[in-house]
Amino acid sequence: MKSYSHVLNEIDSSERSIDYAHQINQQKKLAQLGEMVAMIAHQWRQPLNAISATAINLALKVQMEEFYPEEIEKGAFFIQNQCQKMSQTIETFMEFVKPSKEASYFFLRHSIDEALKLIERQLYTHNISIKIIEEQEGIKIFGYEDQFEQVLLNLLSNARDAFDEVDHDEKNLILSISLGDEGECILSIEDNGGGVPEAVRDKIFNPFFTNKEDGKGTGLGLYMSMEIIKKSFDSTLRHTPIKGGSRFEIVFNPTITSLGL
């Protein structure tokens, strides 16, 4: 029979575990919120600048009485078009954060394209080229599509940040989709952004570990990505160092991988 003090120690240990899990979950939510705000800001900066410049130009023409009705109409149409783009950005993000009600099959390539829509502007402003190699088309994965897109978005964001630490004329990001010998689907995200230092490679999936500069990382992205892939997809997220960069691979279990049209 357990002693009273032993029971108290077990309760205390359990409470500490629950509190630690709660802290991780809260940090995860804050990190995701920060990423979302940053991405919306990037997506909106260009159309806002264009709207401002167009409005100023139209106002000057009116003041100088050098405008024509067709110019006003053209400027108004341009502003309306930019506003529609901004509205579409919000709709895309709302669709992204809306939780899936239940697991289902989804096309892997479609989800990759959807995730890229959220970050392509940032990659473009960082002069990062993207290449997608689809060795096997029509691959479907069974699971929660929104969770997969969150993982992919985190891996792409990490690759983007890695390029800030190196001076490259060519910044390349390669995504490849293939099938393994046992029917497993392998999604590879490879970059030439310098790679993870050897001294910390065994720590990158630990919670709260980050080798980014202060204020740029929470240390939860890779940990939560690994947990999502493991618990929601019964699959594996792994890292492999390559010359001049990194390769992250999501290896989807054959039991949740399917080919379909």
Image (tube, helix red, strand yellow):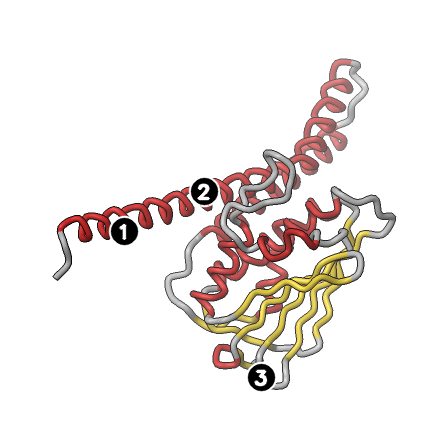
Q: Quadrant of residue 102?
A: bottom left
* Residue 49 picture location, percent across and down: 70, 31
Disc 3 target residue: 183
Q: Residue at x 70, y 69 (%)?
A: 176
Few, some or many residues within 10 Å of mark 2 (<14, 14–19, 20+): some
Kind of residue at disc 2: Gln
For marks 2 and 3 on the same chain, the one whose residue lies earlier in the sequence: 2
* Residue 77 picture location, percent across and down: 68, 37
Kind of residue at disc 3: Gly
| Viewer-side label of 1, 3 | 1
Q: Residue at x 57, y 63 (%)?
A: 111
Of residues 255 and 215, the one nearer the viewer is 215
Q: Is residue 100 above or below residue 124?
A: below
Q: Is residue 80 visible?
A: no
Disc 2 target residue: 27
Q: Residue at x 58, y 72 (%)?
A: 251
Q: Is residue 91 above or below residue 182?
A: above
Residue 97 is tagged as none
